[in-house]
Amino acid sequence: MKLAMIGFGQAGGKILDKFIEYDKRTNAGIVRSAVAVNTAKADLMGLEHVPESNRVLIGQSRVKGHGVGADNELGAEIAEEDIDEVQGAIDNIPVHEVDAFLVLAGLGGGTGSGGSPVVAKHLKRIYTEPVYGLGVLPGGDEGGIYTLNAARSFQTFVREVDNLLVFDNDAWRKTGESVQGGYDEINEEIVTRFGILFGAGEVDEGGDVAESVVDSSEIINTLAGGGVSTVGYAAETVENESSSGGLLSKFTGGGQKQPEDTANTTNRITSLVRKAALGRLTLPCEIDGAERALLVTAGPPAFLNRKGIERGRKWLEEQTGSMEVRGGDYPVPGSDRVAAVVLLSGVTNVPRIKELQQIAIEAQENIDEIRQESEDNLQNLVEDDDDELEPLF
Ligand SMILES: Nc1nc2c(ncn2[C@@H]2O[C@H](COP(=O)(O)OP(=O)(O)OP(=O)(O)O)[C@@H](O)[C@H]2O)c(=O)[nH]1
């Protein structure tokens, strides 16, 4: 499926950069256009793959290219004020060639957290293509302001997009390591999962057509209906004689596909599907209650089969309780891996989201209290002033 990606803020830009690199490396053909937006000039200059002409610096008159310092209200204000500059870059996207927009951002900071919902709303008003979000939640060790920003931005972002795909940094940091230490690895995890998912709908017509190739409309239908989505992934290395790599193949007569035992193929796929759905999800949650799901099995065509997908799909239906579970192949002839990617859409039983919502409610109550307090103080001041004025007359 072809996407127009808009990376907002530092995290959004870096993940976008990684997506382009993945696209070049794997020939997946998912990034049709890429635009990076930021209030910090240094972050835009640090990007490697986003074309320079598609890097948009906003808020120059307000923050002079230095970022908004985790102030997401300022991030949102600037995005609104400078939306024409963002639109200027989007105008260069051949929108008739894309299947959807994907707005990427870290929700804990200021620029991406505040700006991404603003841009998503704008895109939805102008274009008929679906607008998805890829929102990154902060690590628990990053401090209160990041959590509060994420709590507020999450609520707005999920409302503005057609579906919010979520990645939780907190669930992915290694024990004893802060998130900051491992962004490169984390970003690689993000693009692998979402790359296979979106790449599945982008198989060349002339290429290897497997028994049931995933179509981009199946991805769109799984994401339709809104809400929050999470993705699971599991992979296993296989001895693919036709894999492009491996000097050994020259000597062993590589290129001849070894017919695999069908039962083996089916069993491998079934267990990969279980590992993907029950292992670490991009946003950890209970999988029962997911409204819709999509299963993609990727790998060399000789290692994919319809029976494996059918079994995996049935198992997912039982586990999620959903009647809308789609599934299909993503043939990658040169690969030496078989992978299962499970997209769970419309998930409701998510502890991290409940925690964030609670934080947002408490913050809102505190804000009301603070406002009330300052109004009372103001009133007292006025009354005090009145008291002081009276004796004069
Ligand atoms: N997964 C991932 N998360 C990141 C990365 N960089 C930053 N983050 C997360 O994103 C949040 C901070 O957002 P940034 O994107 O750095 O901030 P910003 O949107 O540029 O906003 P300001 O710096 O405040 O102007 C934090 O919660 C980080 O955990 C990254 O490369 N990968």
Image (spheres, rainbow, N blue to C red):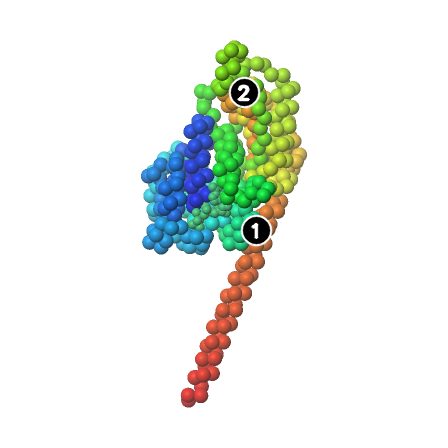
Residue 389 visible in the displayed image:
yes
Residue 190 visible in the displayed image:
no
Residue at the image point whose x is 45% and y is 24% from the top:
204
Residue at the image point whose x is 53% and y is 11% from the top:
252
Residue 25, percent from left and from top: 44, 28
- Decide if ligand 1 comes within 8 Å of the CB at mark 1: no
What's the residue type where badge 1 is placed? Answer: Leu
- Decide if ligand 1 comes within 8 Å of the CB at mark 2: no
Q: Nearer the viewer, residue 288 or 182?
A: 182
Q: Is residue 65 above or below residue 48?
A: below
Q: Verify CB contact (< 8 Å) between mark 2 and mark 1.
A: no
Label 2 and label 1: CA atoms lie apart by: 42 Å
Residue at the image point whose x is 42% and y is 41% from the top:
13
Q: Residue furthest right?
A: 318
**Mark 1, residue position:** 356
Residue 338, percent from left and from top: 56, 25
Q: Is residue 65 left or right of residue 102?
A: left
Residue 309, percent from left and from top: 60, 26
Corner quadrant of residue 4: top left
Q: Earlier in the sequence, mark 2 or mark 1?
A: 2
Q: Is residue 80 left or right of residue 295?
A: left
Q: Secondary structure at mark 2?
A: helix
Corner quadrant of residue 240: top right
Residue at the image point whose x is 35% and y is 36% from the top:
51
Q: Is residue 65 above or below residue 309?
A: below
Image quadrant for the C terminus?
bottom left
What's the residue type where badge 2 is placed? Answer: Pro
Residue 210, percent from left and from top: 53, 21
Q: Secondary structure at mark 1?
A: helix
**Mark 2, residue position:** 301
Q: Residues within 10 Å of mark 1 (few under 14, many from 20)?
A: many
